[in-house]
Amino acid sequence: MGKNEYAKPDSWSLKAQKEGYPARSVYKLQEIDEKFHLFRHNFQEGAPLFKALDLGAAPGSWSLWTLRKIKSAGFVTACDLQPLSRTFDKGLFDGGNFFFLQGDMTVPENYAKISGTGPFNLIISDAAPFTSGNRSLDTARSLELAENALHYGETCLRRGGNFCVKIFQGGETAGYIKKLRLMFGTVQTYKPKACRSSSFELYAIGLKKKSG
Ligand SMILES: C[S@@+](CC[C@H](N)C(=O)[O-])C[C@H]1O[C@@H](n2cnc3c(N)ncnc32)[C@H](O)[C@@H]1O
């Protein structure tokens, strides 16, 4: 599919809205979780608080899905340059177990605010640059965001914690995966079915951080 693929809502987007999510990307996280069990944790009453960090969170589907999954047994920190959509959250984004920072995840002052809400059991990053159509430029920008997400992974993900990051396939992907292998017990890349067929994005998943 070409340019028009993004022009009108497709069946995934319509399904997302019907099911209470602002974006189709929710099904990517759902599928990744089904396959890799990112949220492997005991959510019973009395279990320690599960903390998740959602980078590049707007319009908010991944945060909403995470909040609905962990309920009151966890805390979600989210960050995006853009505001979150308030159409579907039914007040969840106003809850005491959610913190949203509107700003650039890569700048030190925001790093300090975000890391201050950790350490995290899970870091998910769907952050993506505004695409220019120049594949090598877009890939390089995406890698910069992925490197940044990895910095959060290195510094504020708990030992045993899981990590999931969007990357655009290209140039330095192999080098990035190598770094993940040093940090995590298991590393895999995966392209969920809900990704647009024309998109060159995929997700790198790191499970069980080796040190904390
Ligand atoms: C594909 S969207 C995320 C969709 C989201 N996971 C959801 O389910 O609703 C990618 C997001 O990355 C954000 N982004 C890009 N660069 C960023 C940065 N430097 N800091 C924070 N967010 C960034 C964009 O603003 C955009 O909202």
Image: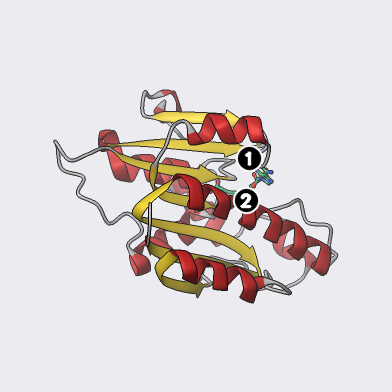
- The circle on residue 148 is 2
**Amino acid at circle 1:** Met
> Who's the residue at 47% across and 29% down the image?
99
Q: Position of residue 123 (x, y in %)?
A: 46, 50
- When asked about the image quadrant of residue 185, the answer is bottom left
Above or below: residue 159 compared with residue 140: above
**Amino acid at circle 2:** Asn
- The circle on residue 151 is none
Q: Is mark 1 within 8 Å of ligand 1?
A: yes
Q: Position of residue 22 (x, y in %)?
A: 54, 43
> Who's the residue at 48% across and 59% down the image?
164
Around disc 2, counting alpha carbons within 10 Å, would you say few (fewer than 14), some (14 to 19), or many (20 or more)? some
Q: Is mark 2 within 8 Å of ligand 1?
A: yes
- Residue at the front extreme of this rendering: 211
Above or below: residue 92 compared with residue 105: above
Q: Secondary structure at mark 1?
A: loop
Mark nearer the N terminus (2 vs 1): 1
> Who's the residue at 31% across and 45% down the image?
69
> Who's the residue at 37% across and 39% down the image?
67
Around disc 1, counting alpha carbons within 10 Å, would you say few (fewer than 14), some (14 to 19), or many (20 or more)? many
Q: Nearer the viewer, residue 2 or 141?
A: 141
Q: Is residue 204 left or right of residue 105?
A: left
- When asked about the image quadrant of residue 119, the answer is top left
The N terminus lies in quadrant: bottom right
Q: Position of residue 36 (x, y in %)?
A: 36, 67
Q: Which residue corresponds to mark 1?
A: 105
Q: Position of residue 49 (x, y in %)?
A: 27, 37
Q: Secondary structure at mark 2?
A: helix
Q: Nearer the viewer, residue 9 or 106?
A: 106
Please report contact status of discs 2 and 1: CB closer than 8 Å, yes or no: yes
Q: Is residue 175 left or right of residue 203?
A: right
User: Is any atom of residue 68 visible in this view?
Assistant: yes
